[in-house]
Image (cartoon, helix red, strand yellow):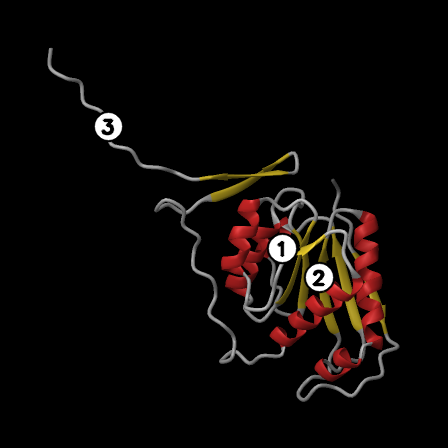
Amino acid sequence: MQSVKTTERDDTFSMKPMKGSNKTLKILVLEDEELMSALLNRYIQSLKQEPRFQSLWGSSGVDIISLPSGFDLLTQDLSQYDVAVVDMLLPQITGVDLIRDFRKRFPQLGLVPISGMATDTMKRQLKDLLPDGVRLLEKPLRKESFYEAFLTALEHKSLTPQQLPKGPSPIVEGGEEPWTAVTGGIQKTVSVEKRPLLRKRAA
């Protein structure tokens, strides 16, 4: 699938800036379903009417970058982004792997994980990866639930480096670190188990 990059800018924001913040809010939306991506864009744009949003973040505008996959982001500098909305099932990579990478390299990035088909393994992994107060949103998304999750992500972004929780430790199952792979949109988790070699008995 060819990556499609769209940028939406809303220059109609007229808010009192949060202390120390006077820049465009930059948001990543990683969602491969076009209709859901468009819905997320509308939800984010409509947040400007929320008083809590205005008190949390002051901005001259908002840039929303929508991508159908996030595989290429593993090698890119995302330090300029404030919030990432991440679907769990994406082409080439899972949302769990993306969030693990984001938490390690950009601990101040606010996160909004979403999914309609997250496996139990994904949910267990996310519990160890996500900051306190951040949870997986189930599809179909409810606007109020999305608003609350997005505002929580903004609150995380507003923390100083000293206030940030420590990044996640590697997830270990059975003494070995698992790796994840996606084939046909289905995630598989593979754990390596060490077993002793059996010796042949003497005849």
Looking at the image, tell me whether mark 2 or mark 1 is earlier in sequence order: 2
Nearer the observer: mark 3 or 2; the answer is 3
Location of residue 182 (image quadrant): top right
Quadrant including the C terminus:
top left
Q: Would you call the spot at circle 1 few (<14 residues within 10 Å), some (14-19), or many (20 or more)?
A: few
**Residue at screen point 39% across, 38% down:** 192
Task: Indicate the quadrant containing the N terminus: top left, top right, bottom left or bottom right.
Answer: top right
Which callout, 3 or 1, points at the residue further toward the start of the chain? 1
- 47 vs 120, nearest the viewer: 120
Residue plotted at (52% across, 43% down): 180
Quadrant for residue 42, please give it: bottom right
Do residues under tags 3 and 2 come within 8 Å of each other at their CB atoms? no
Amino acid type, residue under disc 3 in the picture: Leu
Residue under numbered circle 1: 73
Q: Which residue is mark 3?
A: 197
Q: What crowding class fits label 3: few (fewer than 14 Cα within 10 Å), some (14-19), or many (20 or more)?
A: few
| Snapshot quadrant of residue 24 | bottom right
Mark 2 is surrounded, within 10 Å at the Cα level, by few (under 14), some (14 to 19) or many (20 or more) other residues, namely many
Kindly check if marks 2 and 1 are in contact, taking CB atoms under 8 A apart as contact: yes
Q: Residue at x 62, y 55 (%)?
A: 73
Image check: 15 left or right of 149? right
Q: Secondary structure at mark 2?
A: strand
Q: Amino acid at mark 2?
A: Leu
As drawn, 195 above or below 135? above
Of the numbered discs in the image, which one, if any, rests on residue 173? none
- In percent of width and height, residue 82 lies at 67, 70
Task: Using the image, tell me which numbered label, if any, was put on residue 28.
Answer: 2
- 135 and 63: which is toward the camera: 135
Residue type at the position of mark 1 = Leu
